[in-house]
Image: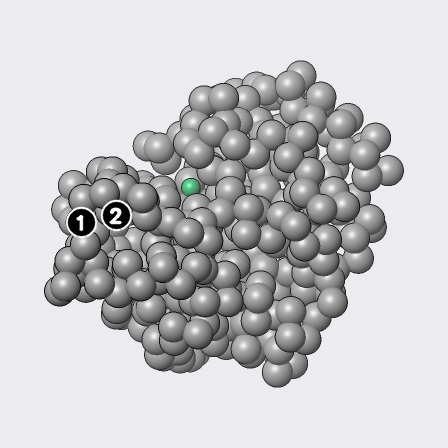
Amino acid sequence: MIPHFYYHPRMMEYDFGPKHPLKPVRLARTMSLLRAMVPSVQVIDPGLATEDDLLRVHDEEFVDVVRRIYGEGVGKEELFTYGFGSVDTPPFAGIWEASLGYCGGGVAAAKALVEGAQLSYNMGGGLHHSQSNRASGFCVFNDPAISLAILKERFGKLLYVDIDLHHGDGVQAIWLDDPDVVTLSIHESGKTLYPGTGFVHEEGANGSAVNIPLDAYTTGDVWLKAFTEIFPRVLDRFRPEVIVLQMGCDPHIHDPLGHLQVTVQEWLGAVKHVRDTRLPILACGGGGYEMSNVPRMWAAAVMTLANIEVPKLAPSDIPVEWGVGSIFDPTPTERGIGLASAQGVIEYWRRKLG
Ligand SMILES: [Zn+2]
């Protein structure tokens, strides 16, 4: 059974336009594949987030600008100040409602765990780059940070785990000074990739920011080894009571935005480690820009967290042209790339976390 799955097609209205790499169709295809593989999945409409939900982690002026950006309009200078001046995160018609849409999933999924659920999903969310006072990197509001704020109503120690290709900089920054919210992010190094942060020395309050930066072209065996070495140490050290898991699937070898070489099965290995903690988990989406990867990786991750076995092949009614026929990847021939550098990071955290 897949419990507390919050989604609504309105989440596809979060759309920067046809030339933008973030393609809402990835959500529709994920839902089609998931429904084909688990026909019993009950999809719940979470409704929209409220302004009060946003204000848990965002500044009032910033929230106000997003509300006015279409309709009333805002000046060019304000657009730049609040993160909307780039081709990455341009304003679009309906941006306010669309942003409330995916944040609504984060609110509902968090409230489910507060009320005692063990697992909940907001696959339309995971927008981890947004800062308290500005939009950034395709992200207007930071739904994982909002989910964490709601989870604090019940849980004393919270762990955010981010397996996206990119550093979860917004969530880290928003919670950096709170020793009870630990952030763990594994990502391609900021030396070669946006947002240029996520190094080991960014420690936060009481060491609450744990970063695993990996060199460009690091292969999935090394990626999973680094995660497997450091994640249990974070659990032992901080003893979290709940986990928010950001499941960006852009570390995949064929994703066009980065240079990691992780296969579906290696990426799912990290998801399994999180599942096996048996802690309550809120799982959200995140990056993922290759349309044949996202549906199979997300459907497989949703099933894995719910302890449903993932079949090797997609059901035959899924269109062949989606390219998701085989859920897993062939075993790659290249192994061990980036190992020496990753060993340095592992050693650093071994010494630090014990
Ligand atoms: Zn990403």
Q: Nearer the viewer, residue 6 or 222?
A: 6
- The residue positioned farthest toward the bottom in the image shown: 115
Residue on which the image places disc 1: 75
Q: Amino acid at mark 1?
A: Gly
Image quarter where the C terminus lies is: top right
CA separation in Å, label 1 and label 2: 5 Å
Residue on which the image places disc 2: 78
53 to the left or right of 229? left
Ligand 1 within 8 angstroms of badge 1 C-beta: no
- The residue positioned farthest toward the top in the image shown: 340
Circle 1/circle 2 CB separation < 8 Å: yes
- At label 1, counting other C-alpha atoms closer than 10 Å, the crowd grade (few under 14, some 14-19, many 20 or more) is few
Q: What's the residue at 43%, 59% (across, down)? A: 59
**What secondary structure is found at the residue carrying circle 2?**
helix
**Residue 71 falls in image quadrant:** bottom left
162 to the left or right of 43? right
Instruction: Report if residue 229 is visible in the image.
Output: yes
Q: Residue 352 — which label?
A: none
Q: Nearer the viewer, residue 320 or 162?
A: 162
219 lies above or below 99: above
Q: Nearer the viewer, residue 31 or 133?
A: 133
Instruction: Report if residue 34 is visible in the image.
Output: no
Q: What's the residue at 61%, 65% (across, down)? A: 281
Q: Position of residue 318 (x, y in %)?
A: 27, 59
**What secondary structure is found at the residue carrying circle 1?**
loop
Q: What's the residue at 65%, 81% (across, down)? A: 116
Q: Position of residue 177 (x, y in %)?
A: 66, 50
